[in-house]
Amino acid sequence: MICQKCGKQNPADSVFCLSCGEKLADTVRSSDGVYFAEDCPVLMTSHSIIKDVTADTVSLQCEFQNLSRKNIVALYISVLCAGIDGGEMQGIDEYVYLDMAVGCGNMFGSDIRISLPNRAARKISITPKKVVFDDGEMWNNDALMLEAIPSISIDVLGNLADTYRRTVPPQRQQCLPQKTETYWQCGCGQVNLPNEPCCILCNTELTSQLESCNTDSLTHLREHYRTIDESEAKIEEENRIETEKAKKLKLRLAFIGICAIAVVIAMFVIFSR
Ligand SMILES: [Zn+2]
Ligand SMILES: [Zn+2]
């Protein structure tokens, strides 16, 4: 990206000119939602439409994650574009992310901007067409577009949500684990392919996660926690009473001591006359 002000050649994903600080790009649309298509070995973890301030053009910047256990060397996508009014406009038939070696769970694409043919494009739909792996195998897709995956909030558990949060480690409290026909989402937020028994990010088993949000076992656990809390409160109260007693005894002893000293002094005064 060439700065119109000073002429410096900047990296493609620059927001400000490295030489003079001139603003080069503006984000006009962005989404952090995760997008997935059935069977697809990649997940789109974020995407935005960026406006080149000086050239008055727009481009698409996406971040993808490799969900498969194999290394990805290329990803082919097509992009449908629409204007702010939803009216269809020229898109991109094919764009290729090339020369990569992306391992399982790793991200790619966030440093690449794909120029959109129409500067008024504000809505986009992305179709992953082909993924090429380092062993030469390929995943092909004709029609399935990437669609947003809705996370399920832990709060849907209602009055069992607190019990769930007490059981599950903090890093797995992003959302409720869910399993569908085409993917499963870990409590850490990671989307996994159906054939993965454990999360590719935190390595937790799917089955144990689904058990941990079972309402029957959560109700049972809530009772268990209540018993623990009650006995802890009881012990605390007993300790408090004991401390109180000890304090009173100390005061009494001190009072007796002072009285004894006073008597001794009084007698000493009387007898010394
Ligand atoms: Zn500059
Ligand atoms: Zn996980």
Image: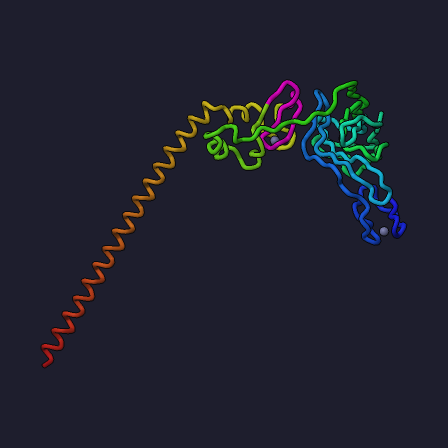
Quarter where residue 77 is shown: top right
| Residue 110 at x, y percent in the picture | 76, 37
Tell which of 240 and 126 is nearer to you: 126
Highlighted range, magenta? 179-196
Tell which of 53 and 270 is nearer to you: 53
Residue 159 in view in this figure: yes
Quarter where residue 272 is shown: bottom left
Residue furthest to the bottom in view is 273
Residue 77 in view in this figure: no
Q: Is residue 234 left or right of residue 78?
A: left
Image quadrant occupied by the N terminus? top right
| Residue 175 at x, y percent in the picture | 57, 31
The residue depicted at 56 percent of the width and 23 percent of the height is 207
Quarter where residue 259 is shown: bottom left
Residue 189 forms part of the magenta stretch:
yes
| Residue 265 at x, y percent in the picture | 16, 73
Q: Is residue 176 left or right of residue 87?
A: left
Colour style of the rendered protein structure? rainbow
Q: Name the magenta segment's main secondary structure.
A: loop
The residue depicted at 79 percent of the width and 28 percent of the height is 82
Image quadrant occupied by the C terminus? bottom left
Q: Is residue 188 left or right of residue 146?
A: left
Question: Vertically, is 195 above or below 173?
Answer: above
Q: Quadrant of ligand 2?
A: top right
Residue 160 forms part of the magenta stretch:
no
| Residue 36 at x, y percent in the picture | 70, 25
Residue furthest to the right in view is 7
The residue depicted at 90 percent of the width and 50 percent of the height is 7
Tell which of 84 and 231 is nearer to you: 84
Tell which of 17 and 178 is nearer to you: 17
Question: Vertically, is 258 above or below 212?
Answer: below
